[in-house]
Image (tube, coloured by chain):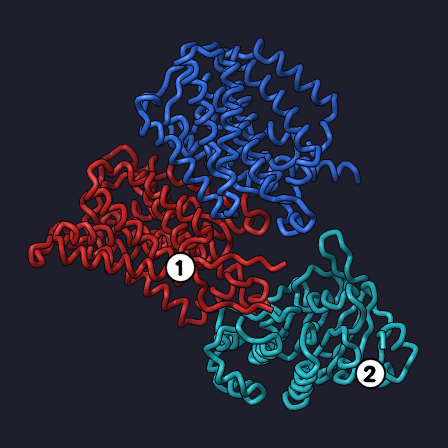
Chain colours: A blue, B cyan, C red
Amino acid sequence: MRGRLPALGSLAVVAVVLAVLPFVLSDYNTYLAAEVGIFFVAVLGLNILTGYTGQISIGHGAFMAIGGYTTAVMSRDHHTNLIVTMLLAFAFCFVVGLLFGLPALRLSGAYLALATFALAISVPLLTDQWSTYLGGTSGVQSSETKSNLWIYGAAWTASAVLFLLAWLILRGRVGRAFRAVRDSEIAATASGVEIGIYKTLAFGISAAFCGVAGALYVMASNGFAQPDEFSVLLSLQLLIGAAVAGLGSLWGVLAGAAFVGLLPNISTSVPVVGNDHGRDVVYGLLVILVMLVLPGGFAGLLARVRSLVRT
Amino acid sequence: MSALLELEDVEARYGPIHALHGVSLAVEEGAIVAVLGPNGAGKTTTLRAVSGTVRRSGRIVFAGRALGRTGPARAARLGIAHVPEGRGTFSELTVWENLRLGAYTRRGSIKQDVERVLTYFPWLSERRRQQAGTLSGGEQQMLALARAFVQRPKLLLLDEPSLGLAPVLVAEIFRIVRELNEKEGLSVLVVEQNAHLALQAAQTAYVLEAGKIVLSGTSSEIRADDAIRASYLGY
Amino acid sequence: MERLKAADLGQIVTGAFLLAGAIFLLVGCLESSNFATYTVQGVGVGMTYGSLALALVLIYQATHVINFAQGELAMLTTFIAYQFTKWGLSYWEAFSVTLAIAFVLGTVLQVTVIRPVQHRSVIATVIVTVGLFLVIDGVVNWIWGGQFQTLPLAFGFSSWDVGGVFIEKYYVGMVVVVLVSLTAVWALFRFTKLGLAMRAAALRPAAASLAGVRVDVMLAIGWGLAAVLGAVAGLMTQASPLSSLDPAFMQPVLVYAFAAAALGGLESPAGAVVGGVAIGTFLTLLVGYVPQISSDLQLPLAFAVILVVLLIKPSGLLGRRQVERV
């Protein structure tokens, strides 16, 4: 993904598989596949911030919340077309992301992580504050719901579009500036890169992507936006997804999205662990295992495999 | 009689970068040996290879013991004190705490060792409670030396002691090093860009270039040879 | 050449603020008995937040990793203490055994799960702690979940009547126990050879190894100590009759500890403790005196505090400005 579109062949394969999948899978599995698509968009966005620009965030679930609520509220109050709400979510979250990115400029490393953590916890609680408009704990219901097949299509189409957008952004000057910020802020400033602009931009873009993911997420929850759906755990999931994905690879993002989208649901079917808690334990152990074995994420693994193949 | 420290065909790398290409040298017991050469020649890497701070291959024997995969902490316990480039003093700790840290590997009372150190660096006792970071560059270098000495090492690895210091201070530091060598029998392997000073203190010298030893000999030989001085040592 | 200033202006201003705050509390206590009761409560819970915050800071200082599992680890050790009381030990016997177990647990976790990743990637290490969070949470729920259980009260539930003011014994007890453990840890770092080595390993690991310090071992011990501090926080949180031994009980405390650490500065152990007490008293007084603010709002308030502090002073109230050497 670093300025090099993955081989057209592999893209074609992916496209074909995605097109065929819903006809092969059960309705529930189509729903799972849609979830993977949703996480793909979110992890893609978060990766732009953490992977390419080196800024850590444990709060992007908050942007998913904002995007999701945008969809639900617009649909409930104005019966807006759901696709249009996705665009609105994108735009709105972009602005909010920029607004958050500005003060966040003064923070770095763990302090930034804590600030984003604060964001992740506070935003869902805001729905309680404006409960007349935002429904409080009972949430907001959109005026229409869509089938799992529709959501699957919307999620993966959005993924394709946003992937292309990400590729365009990252291959150019902006992408280089992002990487310069990540590698060394001092060197970047010395080379004339306006760090502030790019860091803020990275926040805005990643927030926008997560906003779209949030919109889709709400649609996938029967059009229902609820604060519980957007807890801190969601932000942690996104971070796990980004870490498993690693940096710089389409396949990595896919792997990360599949990891957080599928594993928590699949662990239930492992016979040893019949209950919810067992599932959490298994999932947690898998997370630990993956990080121990692949600290560079899936992309790191691919890079190693490629270099082995070359020699 | 075998030397205190022997390097044979030592190679070292930083990831993909090959820094040392087969370096062989020896430090006799009680000697001061200098490693000279231009920037980037691998002098610091040579010291790091001895203390185990960098990955290396080849044969390194210290006091009759082969240092295979020994890391720096173990090397310190075996009697190697490495004063790195930039001194390695703990700015946030006090002078006294820095010295105490030097005694980390020693068992029992360190009172005698500390008193001995204070005879070489008498000014340290008044400054014990001062934060090491507030000392001047020269004082920090001497503190680093003092800490290394508290370790009661057999071999001192000294990396660019003159870096960033005024000539008067550098001369003082070399004087103390020579004193430690003569009175305490401390063997020293010193890396220096300032060849002139190093050759005055050392008995033997090696010249390193691009990770290889290109020249070795006694310091009087090297100093006497104008051609060598001009082409390799720049003076 | 580095020349460190003894204290920069920010720290002096902060110190002044804290002093003003302390005076305000003192005067308030003397004026109003309600205020005094709230203050004692606030300081009591604040100390537990501070203990957990200190655990976070200890690990952060040495490794730049935020241990997301610190709260759950504290919770686990509290449940272990509970189990010991069910097996017949007295409260304080269980307390002591648990602290020892916590130490071992902390070091074992560091060696098995953290050490393999910590050198390679900070973010991978943080994710591992998130994984630990999930695992511990799941395990505790699996073993002890679903039932109603309580830990015997450490200090009973009575209060003293001090000239018309009701001071609950357990809050005082919390303060004393936490203070004792903090003092012990401080003494370890300040006066012992091991403590010095640990500080050196945290400050400059490369230079520390040259002095013979085994940095990896120091890190493991650091995790053990942090786990002990966490256990103290967990056990003392349960010393209040108002708390129930529920697997989620440390989650809000972790949030308050994060707030305290951010407030005090992630690199400042004193800041963590002071931050904890500050947040504890601030929130308790606020909830006590402002009827619109229910105790549910404490969590987001703590975070509002974090955000505001970080906006004004990005390295925390007592933290030093991070200077980067070019």
Residue C293: percent from left, percent from top: 24, 37
Check if mark 2's residue and mark 1's residue have beta carbons within 8 Å.
no
Position of residue B4 in the picture relative to residue A40 (left or right) = right
Q: Which residue is pictured at 70% across the width and 76% down the height?
A: B162
Res A44 → quadrant: top right
* A197 is higher (above) or lower (below) than B181: above
Residue at image location 44% in from the left, 46% down from the top: C311
Would residue C32 appear left or right of B24 to someone viewing this image?
left
Q: Amino acid at mark 2?
A: Ser
- Looking at the rendered image, the quarter that the C terminus of chain B falls into is bottom right
Q: Chain of mark 2?
A: B
User: Residue drawn at (50%, 61%), measured in percent from left and top?
Assistant: C202
Q: Chain of mark 1?
A: C
**Residue placed most toward the observer, C266 or A38:** C266
Which of B197 and B26 lies nearest the eye of the viewer? B197
Secondary structure, mark 1, is helix
In the depicted structure, whether residue B149 falls above or below residue C222: below
On the image, the x and y values in percent for residue C326 come to 63, 58
Looking at the image, can residue C67 be seen? yes
Query: Which mark lies nearer to you, 2 or 1?
Result: 1
Query: In terms of secondary structure, where does tag 2 sit?
Result: helix
Q: CA distance from mark 2 to mark 1?
A: 52 Å
Locate the N terminus of chain B by quadrant. Answer: bottom right
Co-location on one chain, circles 2 and 1: no
- Residue A17 in the image: state x and y as whole percent: 64, 16
Q: Which residue is mark 2?
A: B219
What residue sits 44% from the left and 57% below the top?
Answer: C319
